[in-house]
Image (spheres, rainbow, N blue to C red):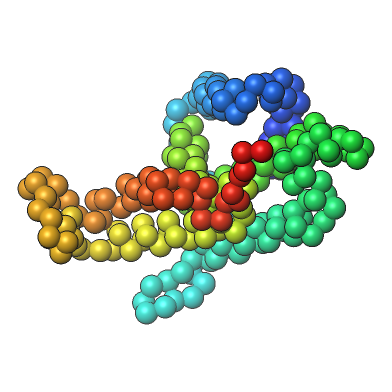
Amino acid sequence: MAPLIVGAVGAMFERLLLWRVHGRGALADLLLTFGAAMVIGEGVKLVWGLGPLPASIPPVLDGPLFTVYGASFARYRVFMMALAVIMLAALWLLLRTSKTGLVVRAALTHPDTVETLGHDVPCVFTMVFAVGTGLAALGGVIGVPLAVIEPAMADAMGPIVFVVVVIGGLGSLHGALVASLLIGCVQTFAVSASASAGSIAASFGVTLPPAWAQLTVTQLAPVLPYLLLVAMLAARPRGLFGERTSDT
């Protein structure tokens, strides 16, 4: 029920508050949503407290599904991966093959033209926001059995989601998929690596200070996605699959 409830709340938020600042640019949208996130977070603390809440894995999805070279793969992780792929495929089909998707994509780039064709653009924006918040809630519901239900969940996930969106390219579903796989693989290999920053720098003929040279790749793993973000913004600001925007 959480995705439906949160989606409805998201539609109300967009209709009652967010639409009032749409004409003031992206900064106003960002400030309003950021402030709302802080208010919601504090409200959660007031209602449920600061302590974590338990979330158990359903018995039918508990336990290993298969084993590869001695490493077992949990059923619930397979369920999460399968549902993520289904959600992505459904969104892609909706946006690329349906009339609704055509109207949504057109409303984002040419709202005035879409309105002249008889479509309610504000209603379209409300629907998109409601679906987005509902999917965010669905992701939270699915992810909590492997995490901890606590007020800072969004603070932990928000930055890495931002990195995925920027690296993949704004508005690109397959870009988000590729970027998420790229970041996941980079972090996984980094955690399992035993090399140090000093040895890597020495292979390029660079000598690092002793304090930096002792850092291992495993210790640097949490920073690597943000280094990729900086490199992407410097080399290709629109992301891997983001569309080039014109000045007209």
104 vs 85, left or right, is right
Which residue is painted at 16% across and 57% down in the image?
201
Position of residue 137 measured from the top left corner of the image (x, y, whole percent): 63, 42
Residue 39, relative to residue 206: is it above or below? above
Q: Residue at x 14, y 47 (%)?
A: 212
Of the pair 234 and 61, the residue shown nearer to us = 234
Residue reaching furthest right? 118
x and y percent of residue 101 in the render? 78, 51
Who is closer to the viewer here, 154 or 201?
201
Q: Position of residue 82 (x, y in %)?
A: 61, 64
**Which residue lies at the image location 86% right of the left edge and 35% below the top edge?**
115
Can you say which quadrant of the picture contains the N terminus?
A: top right
Residue at 75% across, 35% down: 125
Residue lying farthest left?
Answer: 210
**121 left or right of 189 in image:** right
Q: Is residue 186 left or right of residue 95?
A: left
* Spot occupied by residue 138 in the image (x, y as percentages of width and height): 63, 47
In the picture shown, does residue 15 fall above or below 104?
above
- Is 155 or 182 nearer to us in this picture? 182
- Is any atom of residue 40 visible in this view? no
Locate the C terminus and report the quarter of the image it occupies.
top right
Q: Report the number of discs.
A: 0
Front in this rendered view, residue 100 or 193: 100
- Figure check: 85 above or below 34: below
Judge whether residue 224 can be spotted in this image.
yes
